[in-house]
Image (spheres, rainbow, N blue to C red):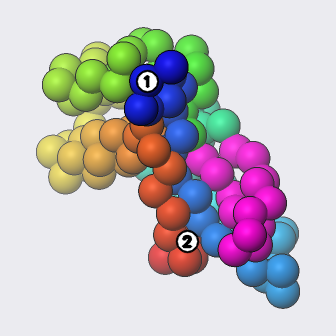
């Protein structure tokens, strides 16, 4: 196996033990819906030395359609075919899909 994963590792969001899971899940669902990516994401909780991490990554079926082999060069064109949007919204979707398809997980300290 090479240096990188063969499936996307996506994005990790630190989920503090004291955090309200229902509120975080609601905020996340709303945000994913607004981005038009609710159906793209696979969500899972990881337990790490730093604490719980909510990992979001592209579902395998979406990954193979949009960025197979981590190739994002034609991502915008593929996204426009599936869900046309204004330029600013499309740029946000393209950036988000790229992050969800990252071969190495990008961790963030919170949802903001």
Instruction: Identify the residue at horizontal 43%, vertical 24% (top origin).
Output: 2
Closer to the camera in the image, 72 or 34: 72
Count of residue discs: 2
Residue 73, by quadrant, is top left
Instruction: Identify the residue at horizontal 42%, vertical 32% (top origin).
Output: 3
Element assignment for label 2:
loop
Judge whether residue 85 is colored magenta.
Answer: no
Instruction: Identify the residue at horizontal 66%, vertical 37% (top origin).
Output: 42
Judge whether residue 54 is colored magenta.
Answer: yes
Instruction: Identify the residue at horizontal 50%, vertical 30% (top origin).
Output: 5
Residue 95 position within the rendered picture, expressed as x and y whole percent measured from the top left: 29, 47
15 left or right, relative to 10: right
Residue 74 position within the rendered picture, expressed as x and y whole percent measured from the top left: 19, 20
Tell which circle, 2 or 1, labels the residue nearer the N-terminal end: 1
26 versus 37 height, above or below: below
The residue to which callout 1 is attached is 2
The residue to which callout 2 is attached is 111
58 versus 111 height, above or below: above
Residue 85 position within the rendered picture, expressed as x and y whole percent measured from the top left: 26, 38
Number of residues whose C-alpha sits closer than 10 Å to that of mark 1, classed few (under 14), some (14–19) or many (20 or more): few
User: Which is the main secondary structure of the residues drawn in magenta?
Assistant: strand
The span shown in magenta is 43-56
In the image, farthest residue toward the bottom: 18
77 left or right, relative to 7: left
Closer to the camera in the image, 13 or 80: 13
Q: Residue 12: tell me if it is visible.
A: yes
45 left or right, relative to 59: right
């Amino acid at each position: 196996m090479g240096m990188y994963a063969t499936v996307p590792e996506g994005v990790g969001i630190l989920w503090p033990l004291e955090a309200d899971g229902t509120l975080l899940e609601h905020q996340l669902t709303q945000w994913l819906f607004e981005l038009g990516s609710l159906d793209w994401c696979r969500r899972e909780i990881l337990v790490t030395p730093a604490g719980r991490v909510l990992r979001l990554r592209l579902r395998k079926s979406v990954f193979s359609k949009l960025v197979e082999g981590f190739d994002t060069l034609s991502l915008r064109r593929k996204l426009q075919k599936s869900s046309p949007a204004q330029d600013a919204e499309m740029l946000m979707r393209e950036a988000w899909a790229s992050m969800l398809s990252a071969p190495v997980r990008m961790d963030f300290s919170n949802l903001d």
